[in-house]
Image: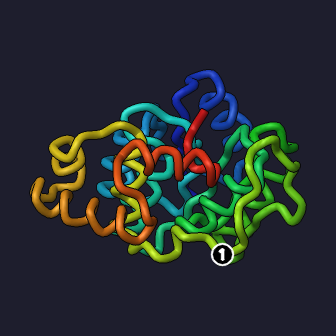
Amino acid sequence: MISLILADDHTMVRQAIATTLKATGLFSITYECGDGAELVETALKFPADIILMDISMPKMNGFAALEKLLHHRPQTKVIILSMHSEPEYVDAVKLAGARAYIQKDAPSELLIQIIQDVASGKSYFPANPQQGSGPVVSSINPMENLTRREREIFYLVVAGRSNKQIAQLLSLSAKTVENHRSNIFKKLKVASTVELIHFAAKNGLLEP
């Protein structure tokens, strides 16, 4: 039986997914989490075979949670379940290290198959995701130049976290966070947090 941790800030959605998966007899839902911070804390203490998570979550968004999970446990198998269909979101979570990406309106049969595939070592990303109305992202993704820790901090900065808050979340010193932040600015060729947020919006990395 495949063990899963579910993370979604909408309780009814989370419970519906859990009910559907349990009914198959193939999966056990070990924990349910309502935000990114709770997910990270839970998953690091009580690892599961698969983490099924949303991107848009409070306290710590899905991007930052994904980066932190993989920083501490690189082999973690994460599936993103999101309402977003924009290609840039698919590219972003793939780059961040997720094993699969599926939209919330997909058939439950597809979700079940993807979970089984990821558990066996495969990955799944839509070949032709619906084209959104957002900007077109270059095939050369500047985020690839950032280290995993820098990407983790990038998403927290974009989410409005201060250096002190990021330091507390990641168990780092404020000085270390500031150094990472400076490196991020240099690599992405931005001069301020405002420009960094504009960069995130332009590249489809800013949550609506």
Q: Can you identify the residue that label 1 sits on?
A: 140
Q: Position of residue 151 (x, y in %)?
A: 41, 63
Label 1 Cα crowd, 10 Å radius (few <14 / some 14-19 / many 20+): few
Residue 115 visible in the shown view? no
- Image mark count: 1
Image height of 43 relative to 147, above or below: above
**Disc 1 secondary structure class:** loop
Instruction: List x then y, in percent, for residue 190.
Output: 41, 58
Give the residue at the far front of this rendering: 191
From the viewer's perspective, tell me whether residue 116 is left or right of residue 175. Answer: right
Query: Viewer-proximal residue, 172 or 19?
Result: 172
Instruction: Give the percent coordinates (x, y) of residue 50.
Output: 56, 59
Residue 173 screen position, x and y as percent: 10, 57
- At x 15%, y 58%, the residue is 172
The residue positioned 61% from the left and 28% from the top of the image is 15
Please identify the quarter of the rendering in which residue 183 is found. bottom left
Which one is in front, 189 or 14?
A: 189
Query: On the rendered structure, is 165 left or right of 66?
Result: left
Residue 82 appears in view: yes
Tell me the quadrant of the picture where the N terminus can be found: bottom right
Q: Residue at x 62, y 57 (%)?
A: 79
42 lies above or below 142: above
Quarter of the picture containing the C terminus is: top right
Position of residue 183 in the picture relative to residue 173 (left or right)? right
- The residue at 61%/70% (across/down) is 141
Q: Hey, which quadrant is residue 128 in on the image?
A: bottom right
- State whether residue 60 is above or below residue 196: above
204 over 119 or under it: above or below: above
**Amino acid identity at mark 1:** Ile
- Which coloring applies here? rainbow
